[in-house]
Image (tube, rainbow, N blue to C red):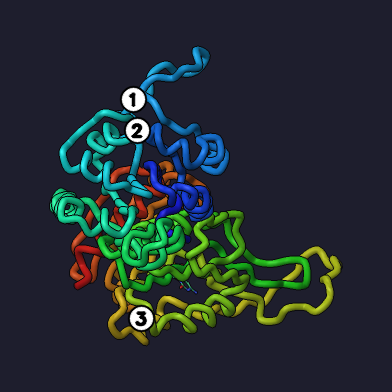
């Protein structure tokens, strides 16, 4: 998944010939999973039509402060647009727009929105060679950098005028790669590899039956999404679940049984920095899987079970630099039992859910947790959505890792 997935991106298009590339840029932003709105200067509409960008962005395009169509909203609020955006990208940014931005002018919707935006602003300057090299333009760029705008440098090459040099707008792919890199490097889990187990495991009895449990996988999937949002490279090893993870950058590995989960985990464990075992792994499996469907015969039947491998305990034994976190679902003596698991499995911390808490545990969208660390420190959290719980868990881990 791209780090831009789920983000609101406001694309500002000004009147340069490179505006034709914004069709590709918009398409790539949408493909990366971003919600895109476009604001154009009136002159930019001479280079590419608002209709083209609107169709590609799947959103209306804003050009003027007021809307000439009576049936639609009358007023385009630059403040609302600025607040909506997680990131603003001005591409192409002409010399004229750079000068206006530097001076705080607000004589069109685009620059007024820029002035209102509280989010990071990426700017891709584009103009002819001599305009770009002119001291006033260079000076404007320096000042805009000092205002914390992020300048995406133009590429060197043949320009529309026939001159050669810097001034060509970076290609759409390069602009997106630049944004992704810049955003990731500021994220707290940048460069960290996170391994998460999720969901139940199914232990086969015969070709059609299994031993399983009610784990939905929700918690593990929320943890994976949160880790990506914090910049991590994520491997998610999951048992059978209906959960869908729209984040294509997550390395999702589907498994069925505890043994398959064990093998998948150990293929990735050595490289991991943070490991969270959120899976509800079956503790027992049938000694033998019948090759044919078992027919009903007598009134009673016995199934001989044997323990599965405790994946988390094995990880504890092999632990080197990983931060290792487990989950414990308890019904009695919760804290004492969870603490025992920290010691038995060599964990750095454990997330405790109590089935005594309403709204916590399997199938719910909410969870109420306590995190206990290996120094017996207990941090209690209120009932929260699993998404918020995932954030709490990673905020806790960030305080613990170097
Ligand atoms: N776990 C695991 N492999 C297993 C069993 C459990 O990796 N075969 C992990 C779970 O993902 C969870 C933690 O161990 O992070 C706690 O699991 P739990 O089943 O609650 O604890 P157990 O150690 O199995 O003890 P008990 O069932 O007796 O409570």
Image spot of residue 277 (x, y percent): 42, 68
* Local crowd size for mark 3, using a 10 Å CA cut-off: few (<14), some (14–19), many (≥20): many
Q: Quadrant of ligand 1?
A: bottom left
27 or 97: nearer the viewer? 97
| Residue 316: mark in rendering | 3
Q: Are marks 2 and 1 in contact (CB under 8 Å)?
A: yes
Q: Secondary structure at mark 1?
A: loop
Which residue: 56% across, 40% down?
Answer: 52
Give the CA distance from mark 2 to mark 3.
Answer: 49 Å
Image spot of residue 186 (x, y percent): 25, 61
Tell whether circle 2 marks a residue whose Cβ is less than 8 angstroms from ligand 1.
no
10 or 212: nearer the viewer? 10
334 or 175: nearer the viewer? 175
Q: Secondary structure at mark 3?
A: helix
In front: mark 1 or mark 3? Answer: 1
Image spot of residue 261 (x, y percent): 54, 75
| Residue 77: mark in rendering | 1
Which residue: 49% across, 83% down?
Answer: 267
Residue labelled with disc 2: 81
Residue sitting farthest toward the front: 162
Residue sitting farthest toward the top: 70
The disc, 1 or 3, on the residue closer to the chain's N-terminal end is: 1
Please state the total of marks drawn on the protein image.
3
Which residue: 43% across, 56% down?
Answer: 160
Q: Secondary structure at mark 2?
A: helix
């Amino acid at each position: 998944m791209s780090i831009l997935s789920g983000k609101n991106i406001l694309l500002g298009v000004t009147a340069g010939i490179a505006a034709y590339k914004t069709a590709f840029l918009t398409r790539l932003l949408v493909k990366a999973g971003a919600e895109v709105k476009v604001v154009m200067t009136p002159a930019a509409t001479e280079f590419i039509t608002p209709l083209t960008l609107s169709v590609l962005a799947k959103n209306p395009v804003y050009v003027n402060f007021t809307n000439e169509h009576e049936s639609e909203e009358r007023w385009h609020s630059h403040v609302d647009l600025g607040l909506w955006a997680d990131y603003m990208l001005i591409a192409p940014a002409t010399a004229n727009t750079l000068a206006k931005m530097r001076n705080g002018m607000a004589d069109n919707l685009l620059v007024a929105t820029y002035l209102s935006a509280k989010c990071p602003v990426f700017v891709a300057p584009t103009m002819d060679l001599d305009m770009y090299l002119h001291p006033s333009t260079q000076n404007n760029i320096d000042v805009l950098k000092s205002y914390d705008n992020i300048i995406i440098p133009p590429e060197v090459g043949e320009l529309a005028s026939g001159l050669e040099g810097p001034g060509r707008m970076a290609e759409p792919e390069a602009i997106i790669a630049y944004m992704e890199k810049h955003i990731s490097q500021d994220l707290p889990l940048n460069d960290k590899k996170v391994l998460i187990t999720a969901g139940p495991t199914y232990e086969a009895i015969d070709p059609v039956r299994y031993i399983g449990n009610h784990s939905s996988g929700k918690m593990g999937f929320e943890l994976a999404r949160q880790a990506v949002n914090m910049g991590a490279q994520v491997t998610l090893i999951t048992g059978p679940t209906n959960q869908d993870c729209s984040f294509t950058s997550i390395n999702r590995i589907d498994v069925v049984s505890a043994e398959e989960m064990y093998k998948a985990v150990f293929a990735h464990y050595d490289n991991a920095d943070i490991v969270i075992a959120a899976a509800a792994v079956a503790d027992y499996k049938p000694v033998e899987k019948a090759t044919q469907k078992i027919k009903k015969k007598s009134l009673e039947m016995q199934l001989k079970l044997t323990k599965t491998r405790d994946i988390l305990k094995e990880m504890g034994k092999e632990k080197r630099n990983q931060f290792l976190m487990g989950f414990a679902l308890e019904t009695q003596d919760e804290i004492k039992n969870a603490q025992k698991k920290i010691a038995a499995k060599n964990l750095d911390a454990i997330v405790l859910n109590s089935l005594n808490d309403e709204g916590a545990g399997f199938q719910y969208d909410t969870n109420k947790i306590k995190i206990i660390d290996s120094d017996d420190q207990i941090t209690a959290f209120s009932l929260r959505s699993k998404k918020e719980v995932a954030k709490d868990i990673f905020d806790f881990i960030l305080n613990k890792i170097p």
